[in-house]
Each structure stands twice: as C-alpha cells, then as structure tokens.
Image (cartoon, rainbow, N blue to C red):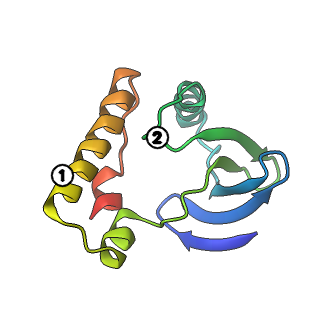
Amino acid sequence: MKKLGRGGFGTVYQASSILLLNYVAIKEIEGATTDEKAQKVFINELKRLNGTNHERIIKFYGISLDKKTRSCYLVMEFANNGTLREYLQKNKLEWPEKIQLASQIAEGMSYLHSIEIIHRDLVKHLF
C-alpha cells in the first residue's frame, strides 16, 4: 500500500485489488467505532452509499473493521487525477470546460441528496 495523504478523518492509501484488477483507495478512519451512536449513523450511511451506482460518484466497495485498533477501513474506487484543486492546477480549463465540470459536480451532489446522503466535505475538497 502507498500512503496518499492524511486528513481530518484519517489516512488514505492506494492499494492494488486482485479481485477488481485495478487500484483502490483505502480510507483508514482511526477510532471510528468508539461512539456507538455515531457508529450506527456511519454504518447506515455506508449501506445507502453501497447501493449507489452513478457515473459522478466514486464507487464504494466495502468496509472492514480492525477490532484491536477500532479503526474502520473504507475501500473505494481510486480516482487517479487527485483532488479537484490539483486537477485544476495541472490543467488550464477554458470557461466552457469549467462550467461543464461544475455541472457534473452538481449532478453528483443532486444524486446523493436524492438518496438522502449529505457530502459534508464538498467545499474542502473543491477549493
């Protein structure tokens, strides 16, 4: 596994999936299961996310729990272009392309809201 970064919730790694024949992102959420009520809310949201299939949403493959460390590991589709900020810094987009990108983000957010999932870190990841 290759460490990609660290954020407010934990650490993100890149790993190779033999089953998917592709790379996946693994998000380690340290101590995620210490609060039982928060754990139930978290798991219910993941169950809803597990059933999603939308071209604008990163695919969620599964979750694992380390009983010793109480850390959760989320296995998701690996987005190899980095964050939106990194993508925009590397690629000079013209206004029509920027508008199309904003529209695609809104499309994904609209889908998430339609299944009652709220993306809490959208602004952080966009800008």
Q: Which residue is mark 1?
A: 99
Residue 16 visible in rendering: yes
Q: Residue at x 31, y 70 (%)?
A: 88
Give the residue drawn at x 75%, y 43%.
Answer: 64
Q: How many marks?
A: 2
**Of residues 49 and 58, the one drawn nearer to the viewer in this rendering:** 58
The amino acid type, in three-letter code, at marker 2 is Ile
Q: Is residue 60 left or right of residue 125?
A: right
Could you say where residue 23 lies in the image, as x and y percent from the top left?
70, 58
Q: CA distance from mark 2 to mark 1?
A: 18 Å
Q: Nearer the viewer, residue 47 or 84?
A: 84
* Mark 1, secondary structure of its residue: helix
| Quarter location, residue 78 | bottom right
The reply to whether dot 2 and dot 1 touch (C-beta < 8 Å) is no
Which quarter of the rendered picture does the C terminus lie within? bottom left
Mark 2 neighbour class, 10 Å CA radius: few under 14, some 14 to 19, many 20 or more = some
Q: Tell me the kind of residue under disc 1.
A: Ile
Q: Residue at x 77, y 46 (%)?
A: 20
Mark 1 is surrounded, within 10 Å at the Cα level, by few (under 14), some (14 to 19) or many (20 or more) other residues, namely few
Residue linked to disc 2: 57
Residue 30 visible? The answer is no
Pick out the residue farthest to the left.
95
Query: Foreground: 27 or 10?
Result: 27
> Mark number for residue 29?
none
Whole-percent x, y for residue 122 in the image: 32, 51
Question: Quick one: label 2 or label 1, which is nearer the N terminus?
Answer: 2
Q: Nearer the viewer, mark 2 or mark 1?
A: 1
Q: Secondary structure at mark 2?
A: loop
Percent of width and height locating residue 81: 48, 65
Residue for point 31% across, 43% down: 104
The residue most toward the bottom is 90
User: Within the image, what quadrant is residue 3 found in?
Assistant: bottom right
